[in-house]
Amino acid sequence: MTRREFDDYCQAFKGAANVEQWGGASVWKLGGKIFAICSKWGAGSHSKISFKCSDLAFSILCEQPGIIPAPYLARAKWVQLEDPGAMSGEDIKAYIQAAYFIIMARLTKAQHRELGLTLPSS
C-alpha cells in the first residue's frame, strides 16, 4: 500500500483528521487520538504503516515476518509493517478499520456527538 493509497483509505473514515508530523509522517487521528501512521522512519526507502490493534492482534502480528512492535508505541499495542509485503492491502485496510473502531470506542459520548459518530452494532 502506497502512502497515497493509505491516505485515501483513511480519509474515508467519518471524523478522521490528518496531520503531517514527526518528520513528514502522515498521522491519522480521531478525536485527537491516533489510529494509523504512514512514515519513512528507520532503514529502507519504503513507507512503513503502523496502526493500533487489539491485544490479541498485537500478539499474533508481532510473530509474523516483516511486522514488529511499533517503535515508541508498542506498549500501547501498536505494530509497524517493516516489510511492504508483510500483509496484503486488504488485510492492512481491515486492521486500519479495526484501529479506527478501537479509538472510536475510547472517545467520550460528547466526542461521539461532536464528530457525528456511532459505534457499529455487535
Image (spheres, rainbow, N blue to C red):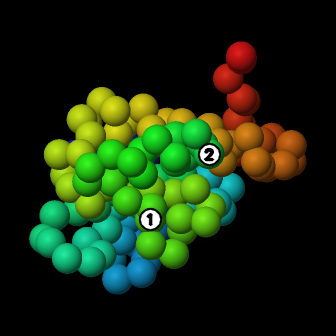
Residue 53 appearing in the image: yes
Circle 2 SS class: helix
Q: Is residue 75 left or right of residue 64?
A: right
Work out whether 80 lies above or below 61. Answer: below
Q: Dot 2: few (<14), some (14–19), or many (≥20) neighbours within 10 Å?
A: few
Outermost residue to the left: 45
Q: Which residue is mark 2?
A: 55
Indicate the quadrant containing the C terminus: top left, top right, bottom left or bottom right.
Answer: top right
Q: Which residue is mark 1?
A: 70
Q: Are marks 2 and 1 in contact (CB under 8 Å)?
A: no
Question: Where residue 92 sits in the image (x, y, percent)?
Answer: 35, 39
Badge 2 amino acid: Asp
- Taking depth in this image into account, of 86 and 24 the one nearest to the observer is 86
Circle 1 SS class: loop
Work out whether 27 lies above or below 88. Answer: below
Residue 16's disc is: none
Residue 36 appearing in the image: no
Q: Residue at x 42, y 51 (%)?
A: 62
Badge 1 amino acid: Ala
Separation (CA) of disc 2 from disc 1: 14 Å
Q: Residue at x 76, y 48 (%)?
A: 106
Outermost residue to the right: 109
Question: Where residue 42 sits in the image (x, y, percent)?
Answer: 27, 77
